[in-house]
């Protein structure tokens, strides 16, 4: 069986976790939920299956030094900095052409770097099973879907198609369709019907297979990616990356490639998963106190219930007589919003930018 290689996608800005997450230190570099930063947890989750020397991190150019410090066992040349964010099609395409140069026979697993997945041993078992499945179906791309536990409206969904034989005890299907983020009624209907999984943005492929898919569906993107790959390991790599990457089309891997290919495989993941998308995720990662408050850092809460209260970079948050709010304090910014509107924090960051207050982003 081919060896597994992992690509950790770490280029997001994490605006919904403002003011803790900033452009210079986005959420994947933060210890949200306690413990190590999310990126470190993602890398260590692969221990025993995919060692650090078979991992690649694609991050923002300004974060290369920070990522290398967090992941010293990953070869420094395998931590690549995007000079400009161009969405996931450019990120995954770049990882595919670089992975092909490292090991053209590898099976690559591409995953976001800011998710929480447990139990980790079961997750590794699914990755190993995916490698077996792609050995048996070498021309396919395999997408992982999360078994939903609630009618979430913030995720896209994957519709299960034909049931295939289990692989190493893991179920396997054909992927029938991608489903756009639904409204609440449609989400509940899909949950009741079954056969629909959350799209976690996690998939596996052989480099040559994905490159062929780009050749068919994003042919204008491939030449630039290949020019970058041809320079990898040479002094001119950074200048060529800086020249070519910003010219790549800005589109998602789902829209640009995955929704257009035929014969994709779908493997359900029955485990605990959280995309840690906004402050509202904190209660799923930390236990609440007796009043239902979830806290991070030094917090004093009096006659207050059901709040999310955080002082992640020092200082103290002290509240009295409030309920169901999010209050986050950092050295130079404070966020207050309703707990049921934590997704709207992105609009705050957009407003700050519109008012010329980018220094706080």
Image: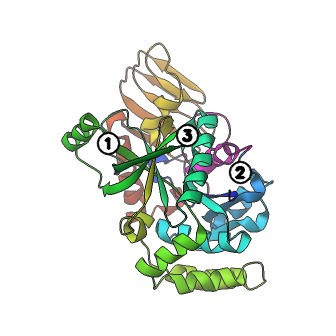
Q: Position of residue 3 (x, y in %)?
A: 70, 58
State whether the magenta stretch is mostly helix, strand or loop: loop
Q: Is residue 142 shown in magenta?
A: no
Helix, strand or loop for disc 3 = strand
- Quarter of image, res 153: top left
Task: Count how many numbered circles sit on residues in the image.
Answer: 3
Query: In front of the other: label 2 or label 1?
Result: 1
Is residue 277 visible in this depiction of the protein?
no
Give the vertical position of 69 relative to 358 (above or below): above
Asked if the residue at tag 1 contacts the one at tag 3, i.e. Cβ–Cβ closer than 8 Å, the answer is: no
Helix, strand or loop for disc 1 = loop
Q: Earlier in the sequence, mark 2 or mark 1?
A: 2
Query: In front of the other: label 3 or label 1?
Result: 1
Depth check: give the residue in front, 95 or 297: 95
Quadrant in the picture for the N terminus = bottom right
Q: Residues within 10 Å of mark 3 (few under 14, many from 20)?
A: many
Depth check: give the residue in front, 312 or 4: 4
Q: Residues within 10 Å of mark 2 (few under 14, many from 20)?
A: many
What number is the disc on residue 116?
A: 3
Q: Is residue 41 shown in magenta?
A: yes
Q: Position of residue 159 (x, y in %)?
A: 32, 50
Q: Position of residue 93 (x, y in %)?
A: 54, 72
Quick check: 10 left or right of 232?
Answer: left
Judging by the rendered image, the residue that carries numbered circle 1 is 195
Judging by the rendered image, the residue that carries numbered circle 2 is 50
- Quarter of image, res 10: bottom right
Asked if the residue at tag 2 contacts the one at tag 3, i.e. Cβ–Cβ closer than 8 Å, the answer is: no
Quick check: 146 left or right of 123?
Answer: left
Segment colored magenta: 20-48
Residue at the (39%, 59%) spot, across then down:
350
């Amino acid at each position: 069986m081919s060896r597994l290689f992992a690509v950790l996608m770490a280029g997001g800005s994490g605006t919904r976790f403002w003011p803790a997450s900033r452009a210079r230190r986005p959420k994947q570099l933060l210890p949200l939920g306690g413990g190590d930063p999310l990126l470190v947890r993602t890398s260590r989750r692969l221990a025993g299956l995919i060692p650090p020397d078979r991992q690649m991190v694609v991050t923002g150019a300004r974060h290369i030094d920070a990522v290398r410090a967090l992941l010293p066992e990953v070869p420094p040349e395998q931590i690549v900095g995007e000079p400009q964010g161009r969405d996931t099609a450019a990120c995954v395409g770049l990882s595919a052409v670089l992975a092909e140069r490292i090991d053209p026979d590898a099976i690559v697993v591409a995953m976001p770097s800011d998710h929480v997945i447990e139990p980790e041993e079961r997750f590794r078992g699914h990755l190993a099973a995916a490698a077996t499945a792609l050995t048996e179906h070498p021309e396919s791309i395999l997408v992982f879907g999360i078994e939903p536990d609630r009618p979430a409206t913030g995720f896209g969904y994957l519709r299960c198609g034909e049931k295939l034989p289990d692989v190493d005890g893991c179920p396997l299907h054909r992927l029938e369709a991608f489903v756009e983020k639904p409204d609440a009624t449609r989400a509940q209907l899909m949950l009741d019907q079954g056969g629909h999984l959350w799209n976690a943005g996690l998939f596996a492929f052989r480099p040559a297979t994905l490159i062929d898919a780009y050749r068919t569906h994003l042919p204008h993107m491939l030449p630039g990616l290949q020019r970058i790959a041809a320079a990898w390991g040479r002094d001119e790599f950074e200048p060529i990356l800086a020249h070519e990457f910003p010219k790549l089309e800005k589109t998602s891997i789902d829209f640009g490639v995955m929704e257009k290919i035929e014969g994709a495989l779908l493997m359900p993941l029955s485990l605990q998963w959280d995309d840690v998308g906004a402050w509202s995720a904190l209660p799923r990662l930390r236990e609440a106190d007796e009043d239902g408050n979830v806290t991070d850092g030094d917090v004093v809460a009096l006659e207050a219930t059901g709040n999310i209260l955080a002082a992640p970079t020092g200082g103290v948050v002290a509240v009295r007589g409030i309920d169901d709010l999010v209050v986050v304090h950092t050295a130079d910014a404070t966020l207050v919003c309703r707990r049921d509107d934590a997704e709207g924090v992105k609009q705050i960051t957009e407003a700050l930018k519109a008012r010329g207050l980018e220094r706080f982003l």
